[in-house]
Every structure is written in C-alpha cells, then in structure tokens.
Image (cartoon, grey):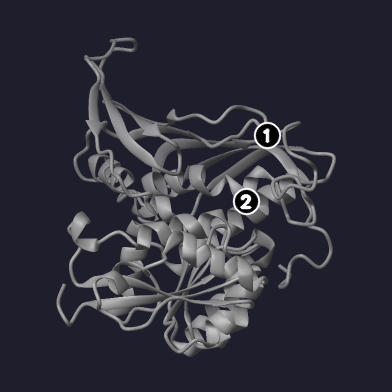
C-alpha cells in the first residue's frame, strides 16, 4: 500500500446479515487478492437502534476495515442510531445500503440528497420508475450510483463469461437454465420478509435477480446480442395467500441469438449448491458449481461429436476457482476503482441495465397478478 492508495470510506445503512457479510469482506487486505491502488475503510454504521449499530461494529470490524488496519486513514468506525447520522458523517464518501427491499428507495434517496455516493443492494428498487428517479438525482449531483448484484463481479462468473464470449468453449449458446430457490413455505411465518406483503416479499425480487443476472451476463451481454433488450419475456407465477409470489418461472429470448433463458425462483424447493445454472451450446455445456449467487467452480462438458444428435460427451473438465472471500469485496473493489477514476456509473453494472432488469420484473409481476400494497411504491410506473 502506498500513500496514493484510494480509500473508499464506507457508511453502512442497515445492520442486518448482508451488511455483516459486506463489512467482514472489507476487513480483508486487498493485497491478499492481488488488488493494488485501492482499499476500504468503514467510517460509520447506522441502525434505528444505536446499541445495534455499536454491536454490529464491535462484532464485524472492531479494528476497522483494511485501510484502518493498515493506518491509511486516522478515523475509527462510528455508530449511529439513525441513517441520517451516517449520511452526514464527514468521513463517509460512499454509502452501502443493506436494508429491507421496501426501504431501498427512501434510504438511497436520503444518501444521494446528502451528497454521498451509493451502492444499493439488489433489488435496487421495487420498480423501474423508482430506479429512474434515483438515477436522476445521482446524475444531477454527479454522484456514483450502482445496484449491488455482487455475483456480477464473482471471478467464476467472469471466467465463464470469457469462456463463452471470447474463447467459444461451448460454441453458440442455445439454452440457459438458472435457478435460485428455498424450501421456505411452511417453515417461515407469513410475516417473514420473504412472505410478507407489507415488505414486498416473494422470491421474484429477492431471489430472482440472480438467475436473471446469469441471463443478462451470458445472453444480453453476448457480443452477438450487443446489449439489445429481450425480444420476448414470458412468465408463470403462483401467488401465496399473502398476495406475494411463492413460485415464479420466466423465460427470455434475445433478438440476435437463437437461444432461450429459463429462470426459476421459488420458495417450494430445496436450495441447490451445484448445477443450479446450466449453459448449453452447440459444442457442449457449462455446469456452474456452488450457489447461484456465489459460484466456486464450473464444469466444462464437451460433446464428442457436435454433428451427431446424441453423440455423447467427453470426460468432464472441472475448473476449480474456490476463494476464501465471501465475495462481496469483489464488488466493493470495483466500486472503489470507479470512484478513484471519477465515474458516476459502473461500466459493468450501468444504470440502463438495472433499469432493464427492473422493467423485466415489472412485466413479470403484471403478468402474474402480483400487486404491491398501496403506498409501498414511492414512485409509480
């Protein structure tokens, strides 16, 4: 580390599980993952309960994050009993928002209006209109804003993207299957965040961003498609007694690729830790290992003779890329580099892509009859 190392000085809004994972990763030394020129500090954490914020910092970063441990900054993490305190802290230059989905818009707006850059957990908002509103604020104030879909920066996903887009490992893509589901029905109460209508629950917005991310990365971003929006979107949805979705399947096709993506997110089937995502091409297929959101390795399965209808496969090739980090720090590193370069949006997770994904979810909800309770959407479509 040198004196010209850029330090992302994070303010944490929301002290729940995802924020604890994020902060834990920020404590890891960038040099351990061969990252140079940037580091991370935790300047503040806020909860609606001061004691919870204090407990959060004492448990997950008692000595501060990597930059504080390496004496690159001279401040210690500070706890606040409000989110307002975090966004007004002079040591905070970017805010990470890990609150409940229904709170994302208001919390991000609070931070942006206070002049802070924002990394906003997925789903960024409840609808595309809310996201457009946040983008307008960020653009007007020249502030960085990005949806936090951490898997987008996972080294395994990036390696698979290169293998398909550049190295032509499996030929032309024909099908993509991706699932993220939990066996939650009957095991969680109707007031749980996944099933509560008051919290805009359901697997579509909570789990669905990950299968859709694989689709957007492999098909939407495929060089032959060149970020052209889906040509068709079809979906089927089952609703729970509370009114939220309990199972959603959706399929997408893109104009320039003769391939279909089939995505599933439900609360009816057990969590899969292997082969949750399968990408099939004319020369073979790739089977992703590890969870949908945190892949650790992948299998290349090549066809013996692509000219035959049922020609069989060669021996599987396992590409093991297991890493020690939780994985949120790869996203944080990217954000720090963007800030260092003076960017207000990420080239790898741009505003228009988040708007498109939110528009896709809007359409799926409409087709499935899932309507949010009055007042949850702060900006209407």
The answer to whether one can see residue 256 in this image is no
Could you say which is closer to the camera, residue 251 or residue 372?
372
Give the quadrant of the N terminus: bottom left
Q: Quadrant of residue 315?
A: top left
Q: Which residue is pictured at 52% across the width and 55% down the height? A: 18
Q: Place residue 29 in its image quadrant.
A: bottom left
Q: Is residue 265 left or right of residue 146?
A: right
SS state under label 1: loop
Q: Residue at x 17, y 82 (%)?
A: 3
Farthest residue in the left direction?
2
Kindly identify which residue carries mark 2: 205
Picture coordinates of residue 360 (x, y %)? 59, 53
In this rendering, the answer to whether 380 lies above or below 301 is below
- Tell me where residue 166 appears, x and y as whole percent: 21, 45
- Check disc 1 and report the residue beneath it: 184
Q: Is residue 19 visible?
A: yes
Mark closest to the chain's N terminus, 1 or 2: 1
Could you tell me residue 272's position as x and y percent? 50, 29
For the residue pair 53 and 323, the one nearer the viewer reads as: 53
């Amino acid at each position: 580390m040198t004196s010209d190392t850029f330090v992302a000085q994070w303010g944490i809004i929301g002290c729940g599980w995802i924020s604890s994972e994020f902060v834990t990763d920020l404590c890891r030394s960038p040099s351990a993952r061969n990252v140079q020129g940037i580091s991370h500090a935790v300047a503040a954490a806020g909860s609606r309960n001061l004691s919870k914020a204090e407990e959060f910092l004492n448990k997950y970063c008692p000595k501060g994050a990597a930059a504080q441990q390496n004496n690159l900054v001279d401040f210690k993490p500070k706890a606040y009993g409000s989110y307002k305190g975090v966004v007004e802290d002079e040591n905070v230059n970017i805010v990470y928002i890990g609150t409940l989905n229904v709170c994302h818009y208001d919390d991000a707006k609070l931070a942006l209006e206070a002049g802070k850059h924002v990394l906003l957990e997925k789903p960024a908002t409840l609808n595309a209109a809310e996201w457009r509103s946040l983008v307008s604020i960020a653009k007007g104030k020249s502030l960085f804003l990005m949806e936090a879909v951490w898997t987008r920066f996972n080294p395994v996903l990036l390696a698979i993207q290169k293998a398909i887009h550049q190295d032509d490992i499996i030929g032309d893509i024909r099908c993509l299957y991706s699932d993220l589901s939990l066996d939650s029905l009957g095991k969680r109460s109707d007031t749980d965040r996944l099933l509560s209508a008051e919290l805009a629950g359901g697997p579509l917005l909570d789990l669905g961003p990950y299968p859709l991310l694989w689709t957007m990365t492999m098909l939407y971003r495929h060089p032959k498609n060149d970020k052209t929006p889906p040509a068709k979107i079809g979906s089927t949805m089952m609703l729970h007694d509370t009114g939220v979705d309990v199972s959603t399947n959706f399929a997408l096709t893109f104009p320039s690729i003769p391939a279909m993506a089939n995505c599933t997110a439900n609360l009816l089937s057990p969590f899969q830790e292997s082969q949750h995502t399968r990408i099939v091409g004319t020369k073979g297929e790739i089977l992703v290992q590890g969870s949908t959101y945190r892949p650790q390795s992948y299998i290349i399965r090549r066809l013996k003779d692509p000219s035959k209808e049922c020609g069989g496969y060669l021996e599987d090739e396992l590409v093991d890329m297991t890493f020690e980090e939780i994985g949120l720090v790869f996203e944080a590193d990217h954000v720090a580099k963007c800030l260092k370069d003076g960017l207000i949006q990420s080239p790898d997770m741009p505003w228009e892509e988040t708007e498109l994904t939110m528009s896709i979810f809007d359409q799926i909800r409409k087709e499935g009859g899932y309507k949010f309770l009055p007042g949850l959407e702060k900006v209407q479509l």
